[in-house]
Structure formats: C-alpha cells, structure tokens
Image (cartoon, grey):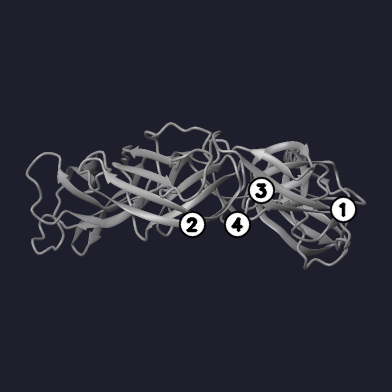
C-alpha cells in the first residue's frame, strides 16, 4: 500500500513539473502604455514561450476578470500578432491574455490604457499606390511609394508589404520620413492583391495604402523591337504587356523624355498572324497627362472576350499621323513584337479512391479521383475551347464495349491557372447484363486522361496522363 502511494506521489510530481516547464509570458503591451483606437493605429502584441506546447494560440482582451473581445481565435504561436483596436472598444484599462488553443498554457499582460486618439494626433497617409493599380515584378520596373504626414513624429519610417492582415515582405527597415521611397518588386513575391503599410520606426504612427495588384513581369511580350529607340524622341514605348481582366488589354508602357503633354494621344495597333499573314488594324484615342521624364501605362481594350496573342505579330504606333510636334521630324514611336511562346498543359491526379461497393446481391466498383489541369506559360491571356477526356481500359485484353469515361468542357483557362475536375463513377458487376454502367471484372486497368484543344498556342493537339489502378 505504501509503495502505491509513493508511486502516485512521484507521478503527481512529474505532472506538476511538466506543467511548470511550459510557460507563456506576454511582453507587450507594458504597464502604463497607451494604445489608440482606430484602423490607422497598428500595434504588435508580443509574447515568449518555453517548453513544448500547442502550435497555435488564441488572444483575448480583458478588463479585470471580464472578457471584452476575442482578438483572434487562432494564430501561430510565434510570439507576435499585429492588431488594430476596434472603435467599438470603450476607453479604459485593459490587459491581453494569450492562451494555447487547447487551454493548457496562458498568460496575461500588464495593464495598459486604451484611448481615443487626440484630434491633433500625428498621422501618415499612404497616397501611392492607388486602388486598382497594377505593379509588375522584376528589376526593370521602378515604382514610387508615396505618403504624406502631419504632426510631430519620428524622422524615419519602415515600409511593409501586406496581403490582407498577413505581412509578406519587409520592403525597408528604415528610410527617411520624407514621403517617397523607390521600389522594385522582387520576383519572389506571388501575384495577387496587396497593400503597403508605412509606419514610423517607433511604431507610433502608421497607415495602410489602398489595395493594388502585383503581376508577373512575364506579361511582357518578348520579341523584336523596331526601329532602335533613340532618346531624342519625345515619346518612347518601353515595352508592351497584356492582361485579361473583363476583356483583353494591351498595356503600352509609354515614357515621355521631353516636354510635358496633356491631351489626346492616338495609338494604332496592327495584329498579324505569323502563318496566314492576315490581320487587322485598330485605332485608339486616349487622353494622356504625362510629365517630362514620367512613364505611364496606357490600357487599350482589344476585345470583350478572349484575344489570344500567341503566334501573332503586334505593332503599336504612337501618333501615327504625326499630329504632335516633336523634337525630331517623322519621329512617331513604333514598337513591334512577335509573341510565339507556347504554353504546356500539366496534368496531375490526386485523391485516388478505388472501392468495392455492395449493391443488392452483388457489388459495384466505385472509382473516384481528381484531375488537375494547369496551362504553364508566359503571359496573361486565356486558352479557350479546352476539353478534358478520361477513360478506363483493361491493361491486357480487348477494350470495353460500354461507355467507360466522360468529358469535361469546353472551358477556358488562363495561363498558370489550375482547374480541378472531380471524377466519381460506378461500374457494374460483370454478371449483370442489364447494368447501365460499363462492367468491370477484377484485374488491372489503365485510366487515361487527355487534354485537347484546337488552340494554336498549345504545344500539341493534346496532352496525356495515364495511371494504373487495381480492382481487387
């Protein structure tokens, strides 16, 4: 009996020791801190941890012993969480609780004060990029992040790239708080919607810019440029890109080297097929306000539907009628590109399930899998009239005489987009001649998936993927 009591005593000590070996310590906010309400103020909740514990925590705002707000229900247990205090929170003294989501370990911060920002509170306002802007990745593109400031604040700021509430990139850890920062977007940043956050290095003042788009530099069409550019001209086309967004657009990246211009500018676009040598000419007139030395993106809407540039020669001429006086006679800007880069279809199969399912006095085979199709290539146009076929055939022996597959399509797919198709088919028992399903015996079968299209940009009439299944 004494021995059992002693064993239980040791176990209790061991459990208590494990509990004490796990700890969370909230290190920010500090006692006496004042945090201001509103979305323009961003604060970092910080904590340290020791011992083995859950990989995620939840964070709560408390006033005394009363819970006021669920700040987040789950965030990685990595020691930091960015937070802006909602306007709905009353002024007062609070504390923050960080707790593992299994409720095993937690800690409360020191008490701090939440207040309304004073009317004369210093402020930063991010003014560039604008909502809807498209910035391209790569070192050949240079953009200016701009902001304004009011009131007294730190002389330096840090700049961050955010996607929603998640920080993606530290653009700079310190730059003068002078309202401008030149930036080229690294290739490692994924395409998507982002915002810029400018914050003083003491974290006292910050602001988020409007949402803008980051796109691949691969939208630039490689090709032959004619004639060679000379900076003696007023206007120069730096390059041409294109994108699909409720229509297909040519994006002319125009630079003005000399006098500022504010008025209508005419563009002529010729599109010729490399094989048939047939094509069309379209004219666009755009109002352009461009300063000397400034570069602008001019969007020319080529169609309301899908407009493929694969295998086409595209020629863009600015001011084709020479109506604008320039520093050099007969100097209208011309750029010609031939785009022949062809995409490749990639097929992958996931979530394969082969089951024998009871059915009345016999059984059926149930075959389930997912087909993923991706068109890999350069650019932003779509491929249309795509079909995905699949079928099942015996590894050895004659083909099945009943319908044994299906077709998905037609559909369109953008370059570097992935589409998923779900297959869920039942096959009848071989002895049930009245079955509407193809009848399969036990054995080995090949499932073949094909992607086919009449699109001239495809590398082949179809791409194919085949895998083996065992019906047992």
Label 4, label 2: how far apart the Cα atoms are: 21 Å
- Coordinates of residue 415 in the picture (x, y in percent): 38, 46
State the SS at label 1.
loop
- Coordinates of residue 302 in the picture (x, y in percent): 38, 55
State the SS at label 2.
strand
Q: Are marks 1 and 2 in contact (CB under 8 Å)?
A: no
Q: Which comes before the other along the chain, label 1 or label 2?
A: 1
Q: Which residue is mark 4?
A: 131
Q: Which comes before the other along the chain, label 4 or label 2?
A: 4
Q: Which comes before the other along the chain, label 1 or label 4?
A: 4
Residue at (83, 58) in percent of width and height: 36
Quadrant of the snapshot with the N terminus: top right
Q: Quadrant of residue 317?
A: top left
Q: Nearer the viewer, residue 195 or 219?
A: 219
Q: Residues within 10 Å of mark 2 (few under 14, many from 20)?
A: few
Q: Which residue is mark 1?
A: 151
Residue at (49, 57) in percent of width and height: 286
State the SS at label 4.
loop
Label 1, label 3: how far apart the Cα atoms are: 21 Å
Mark 3 or 2: in front is 2
**Which numbered tag is attached to residue 286?**
2
- Coordinates of residue 3 in the picture (x, y in percent): 74, 37
Left or right: residue 464 compared with residue 257: left
Label 1, label 4: how far apart the Cα atoms are: 26 Å
Mark 1 or 3: in front is 1
Q: Which residue is mark 3?
A: 196
Label 3, label 2: how far apart the Cα atoms are: 29 Å
Residue at (31, 47) in percent of width and height: 271
Mark 4 or 2: in front is 2
Q: Are marks 4 and 2 in contact (CB under 8 Å)?
A: no
State the SS at label 3.
strand
Q: Residues within 10 Å of mark 3 (few under 14, many from 20)?
A: many
């Amino acid at each position: 009996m004494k021995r059992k009591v002693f064993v239980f005593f040791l176990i209790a000590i061991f459990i208590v020791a494990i509990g004490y070996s796990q700890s969370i310590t909230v290190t920010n906010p500090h006692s006496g801190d004042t945090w201001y309400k509103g979305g323009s103020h961003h604060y970092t909740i910080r904590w340290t941890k020791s011992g083995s514990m859950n990989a995620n925590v939840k964070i709560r705002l408390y006033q005394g012993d009363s819970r006021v707000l669920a700040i987040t229900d789950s965030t990685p247990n990595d020691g930091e969480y960015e937070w802006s205090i909602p306007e709905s929170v009353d002024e007062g003294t609070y504390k923050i609780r960080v707790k593992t989501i299994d409720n095993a370990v937690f800690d409360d911060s020191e008490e701090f004060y939440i207040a309304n920002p004073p009317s004369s509170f210093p402020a930063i306002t991010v003014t560039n990029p604008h909502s809807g802007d498209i910035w391209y990745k790569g070192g050949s593109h240079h953009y200016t992040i701009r902001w304004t400031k009011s009131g007294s604040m730190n002389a330096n700021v840090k700049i961050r790239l955010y996607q929603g509430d998640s920080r993606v990139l530290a653009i700079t850890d310190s730059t003068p708080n002078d309202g401008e920062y030149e930036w080229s977007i690294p290739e490692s940043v994924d395409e998507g919607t982002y915002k810029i956050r400018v914050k003083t290095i003491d974290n006292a003042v910050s602001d988020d810019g409007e949402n803008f788009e980051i796109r691949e530099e691969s939208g630039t069409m490689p090709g032959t440029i004619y004639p060679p550019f000379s900076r003696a001209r007023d206007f120069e086309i730096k390059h041409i890109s294109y994108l699909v967004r409720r229509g297909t657009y040519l994006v002319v990246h125009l630079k003005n080297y000399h006098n500022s211009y504010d008025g209508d500018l005419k563009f002529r676009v010729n599109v010729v097929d490399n094989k048939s040598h047939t094509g069309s000419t379209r004219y666009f007139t755009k109002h352009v306000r461009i300063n000397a030395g400034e570069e602008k993106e001019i969007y020319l809407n080529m169609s309301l539907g899908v407009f493929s540039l694969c295998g086409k020669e595209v020629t863009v001429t600015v001011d084709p009628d020479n109506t604008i006086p320039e520093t050099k006679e007969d100097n209208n800007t011309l750029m010609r590109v031939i785009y022949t880069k062809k995409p490749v279809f990639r097929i992958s199969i996931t979530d394969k399930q082969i089951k024998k399912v009871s059915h009345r006095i016999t059984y059926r085979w149930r075959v389930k899998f997912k087909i993923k199709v991706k068109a890999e290539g350069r650019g932003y146009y779509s491929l249309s009239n795509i079909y995905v076929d699949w079928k099942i055939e015996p590894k050895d022996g004659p083909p099945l005489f009943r319908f044994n597959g299906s077709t998905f399509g037609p559909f369109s797919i953008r370059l570097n987009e992935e589409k998923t198709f779900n297959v869920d088919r039942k096959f009848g028992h071989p002895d049930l001649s009245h079955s509407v399903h193809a009848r399969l015996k036990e054995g080995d079968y090949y499932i073949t998936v094909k992607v086919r299209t009449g699109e001239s940009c495809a590398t082949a009439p179809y791409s194919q993927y085949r895998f083996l299944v065992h019906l047992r």
